Image (spheres, coloured by chain):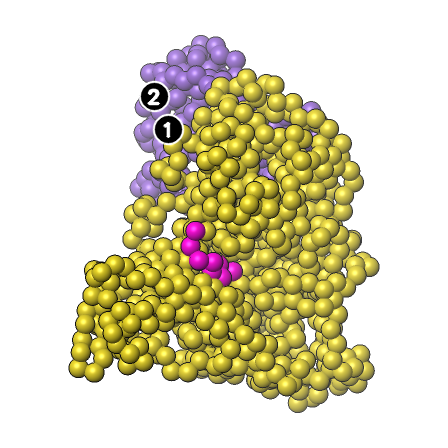
Chain colours: A purple, B yellow
Amino acid sequence: MRSFTYERPDTAAAAAAAVAATPNAKFIAGGTNLLDLMKLQIETPTHLVDVNGLGLDRIEATPDGGLRIGALVRNTDLAADARVRKDYGVLSRALLAGASGQLRNKATTAGNLLQRTRCPYFYDTAQACNKRQPGSGCSALDGVSRQLAVVGGSNACIATHPGDMAVAMRVLDATVETIDAKGAERRIPIAEFHRLPGDAPELDTTLRSGELITAVTLPKPVAGTHIYRKVRDRASYAYALVSVAAILGKDGAGHVAFGGVAHKPWRVEAAEADLPRGAKAVTDAVFADAEPTQENAYKLKLAERTLSAALNQARA
Amino acid sequence: MKFDQPAGQNPIDQLKVVGKPTDRIDGKYKTTGTAPYAYERHDVAANQAYGYVLGASIAKGRVRAIHTEDAKRAPGVLGIVTTLETPRLERGMMNAAYLFGGDQIQHYHQAVAVVVAETFEQARAAAFLVAVDYTPDAGKFDLAVEAKGAPPVPGDSGEGSGGDGEERVGDFEGAFAQAPVTLDERYTTADESHAMMEPHATIAAWDGDKVTLWTSNQMIGWGHGSLAKILGVPKENVRLDSPYVGGGFGGKLFVRADAVLAALAAKALKRPVKVALTRPLIANNTTHRPATIQRVRIGATKDGTITAIAHESTSGNLPDGDPETAVSQTKLLYAGANRLTAMKLAHLDLPEGNAMRAPGEAPGLMVLEVAMDEMAEKLGMDPVEFRIRNDTQVDPQDPKRPFSKRDLVGCLRLGAETFGWAKRNPRPGQVRDGQWLVGHGMAAAFRNNMVLKSGARVRLDGDGTVTVETDMTDIGTGSYTIIAQTAAEMMGVTLDRVVVRLGDSAFPVSSGSGGQFGANSSTAGVYAACVKLREAVAQRLGINSEDAVFADGQVRAGNRAVPLGEAAAQGALSAEDTIEFGDLSKKQQQSTFGAHFVEVGVDADTAEIRVRRMLAVCAAGRILNPKSARSQVIGGMVMGTGAALMEELAVDTKRGFFANHDLAGYEVPVHADIPHQEVIFLDEVDPMSSPMKAKGVGELGICGVGAAVANAVYNATGIRVRDYPLTLDKFLDRLPEAA
């Protein structure tokens, strides 16, 4: 870990201004990912702006019947919230499928959205990784890639977004609310929040420098069975090989997003009309442009079968 | 004491303390944070500085230059020791890779420098400022490629398995060709990491030309000699102290870079230095269990009698490294007149392969016991009965040698009955419970019993306290407790009158912990020392030692009863002895046996495998402490389940290293993976093993359990996977279409 300076502002606008004003500054909330990355010098901020004093920790009803989740609501609290459990079960289940109790107690809503990839080459600073060190190359392309992206990748990067929460938020059509250094607010649809790697894999999201997440809003609840099905190599405390976040009716109609397959939660709305026809019709369309490696091609079949399991559950 | 005759009746047979389920006496220290591991021993040396090891970023080649100027100017930095300014150091015993010194890089993350600073954070930050120039060489990293043409080589795990490159009995090829039922299959097992909780760690301090290392090591005797050799100092100038070890599994049998670099840095800086290996360095800087490619051929008559059996294994290693001894158990486990075993070794430039819990037998049984399951199916036999049919009471390669005690059949039968094996559906893919395909599998467990010379010193104080000192280690196994039980039994006192001090090279040299030889060997050493102490007590009290009875804190002879402590009223009495083993283990084969039974569920849609229940029945001589022995067996079962289902160091065959080098990437089972475990020990003694009549159990639990899991998966699905770990990607496409 390199030396850094630290401040703890009182307002969101001041926090945004502090990061915007300092080159190589970062926000810190729960720190469950950032501190690990700093110890490994994968992240090397010179200044940390601690946002834990900003409030932003309430879950409130919105006028249009949805929920507004403060950026600093801890994962444990969000998963346990009665309204979330009742009306947004997919979100509660996704949160509880991730990390461990200890980490969820600390991790925040905004921080969870911003967690970085778990690609092994991103984590080994001796290896080429365009995401960690732009222009250095991508060792994963011909390296160990069993966990990595099958769709939406590029010649520069096949990392995945490792989270669960964002996959549920994607199927819920959440909106990310931000504030910038000038106090200007912005509402970013979750679909546009995470990026594909393209030729700039160092950028995980469309956030601008200094832009601070203040909340995530959920539209009014969508009826149906809320399912989060996470497939992994062990029963707990592992990243998804594939996950399915779905809201499905008895006839199978509904919405679905996939985790563990791409640089962002992966959803193709146009394919959802086929849900009543069964999993294969949907995943054929959702993964039409997939370019898996030899090691991770199994994810395509796994995604189909996991969606099939979700459809069975909804129909039961 | 020389142990060269079968043990007769002795005080251990009283079983007043030995053999009773006993809480670990170090348990309260462990759970209250008062049993410090090496890195936390803040009080042993003042002014400790922190060393951070920098690992090579290439897998093979040469270091041209190391630029330390920036790092030396970084805050808190006290000094940097680099490999280029250090001559290549000697290697410790049984190690192939060089730990430090010189310009040659043999494997990824080989130590190239240690940066020392006032704090850990400063040392780590400065290490990132060290720039190293390399000239890389092409290396060999892919076992599947290098296995072709790999020659047969002899090898010895040093832990009870090994042999010649090729061993033959009868005419295997002829008998196999004539056998009416045959199996010929190829299997692979993965590289695995010990992944112990406590990383390798050492504090080193010099006092003149004498050095002390507070470290984490399984084998103090080996480490003592190896460090003296590596550091180039006389043995009497080196002291190792390792009273608590947070897991080893074979990864701490040897002196590693933490110890060597702490000693070098402490010398260079004239100040105590502590060094812990970071988690990534544990995968690539230390040793691991090597991957194997195995072929098993079995020929049998239609009634299931094996007539021909062959087991061949190919593994890779650095030059001077050993093969994985994965065929050893096949020499002894089943009868059959015509036999072939072979170990082949390919040159690989990956980190060094070496012993990990049940070296050889763990990956060997993973394969052999799946092959036996496959063969039973070909024969239309129950897999339990097939194994019983081919039981042997003699060494099949040398029928003059009987087993000292072998009740594999008893384990199989009791296990089958307890588990409800008769209710299993032998036709695979038939049992469904909701989303789960349910299957049952079993396998035999087998692990050789090794006996090693082991010494101890026992002292009696005037208050009746008995203090045992031996360099034996407790690596989480319960050594403290069984040693205390042994001394209490021998001296006729309660456990609370016994003090056990372990892990210091100033104490008599013990067997150490490894190869499941520690419990039996080290307690036998304590037994020997206690025999001497009993004689000294009797003599001091003027009692004929043959007549003396040590019980209830007293020494009794005739109608005289004296408190034990009285013998030391005029000064402590001390006795030291070493148990040495004659050739009993050569005349008779000593092994431990067991049977594993496992129920799994396989998700019909996603192919996720979840263990539902496990049973092990073990026959391993006298069980000294059923509580800690059970812990050893269930721990082995967890580890074997990990090997079967998830554990794999993922080799980057282009760049030559294990890529998933942390505990997020290298997955071991979590609690949710292991729902229910049961262990039964057969009530037996083995008088050929030692005066304790005990054998090892620390590794028996891992042996065969992975095959039982894999066989259960086959029973659940009807799909046989022969490449382990058995992850879902290897058979998802063969599951029936999702409904």
The CA distance from mark 1 to mark 2 is 8 Å
Instruction: Pick the residue in front: A93 or B643.
Output: B643
Give the crowd class for mark 1: few <14, some 14-19, many >=20 residues within 10 Å: many
- Position of residue B312 relative to residue A278, above or below, is below
At x 47%, y 46%, the residue is B239
Q: Where does the N terminus of chain B fall, quadrant-wise?
A: bottom left
From the viewer's perspective, is A171 left or right of B539?
A: right
Q: Can residue A247 be seen in this view?
A: no
Q: Is residue B171 left or right of residue B335?
A: right
Q: Do labels 1 and 2 share a chain?
A: yes
Predominant SS of the magenta segment: loop
Q: What element carries label 1?
A: loop
Where residue B35 appears, as percent x and y from the top left, is 35, 48
Can I make out residue B554 in this image? Answer: yes
Q: Quadrant of the C terminus of chain B?
A: bottom right
Residue located 64% across and 41% down the image: B89
Q: Which residue carries the number 1 mark?
A: A72
Query: Where is mark 2, residue-wise?
Result: A54
**B204 or A198: nearer the viewer:** B204
A301 drawn magenta: no
In the depicted structure, whether residue A309 falls above or below residue A72: below
- Which residue type carries mark 2? Leu
Q: Where residue A148 appears, x then y in whole percent?
A: 62, 41
Q: Is residue B556 above or below residue B434?
A: below
Kindly check if marks 1 and 2 are in contact, taking CB atoms under 8 A apart as contact: yes
Highlighted range, magenta: B506-514
Q: Which chain contains the residue that carries disc 2?
A: A
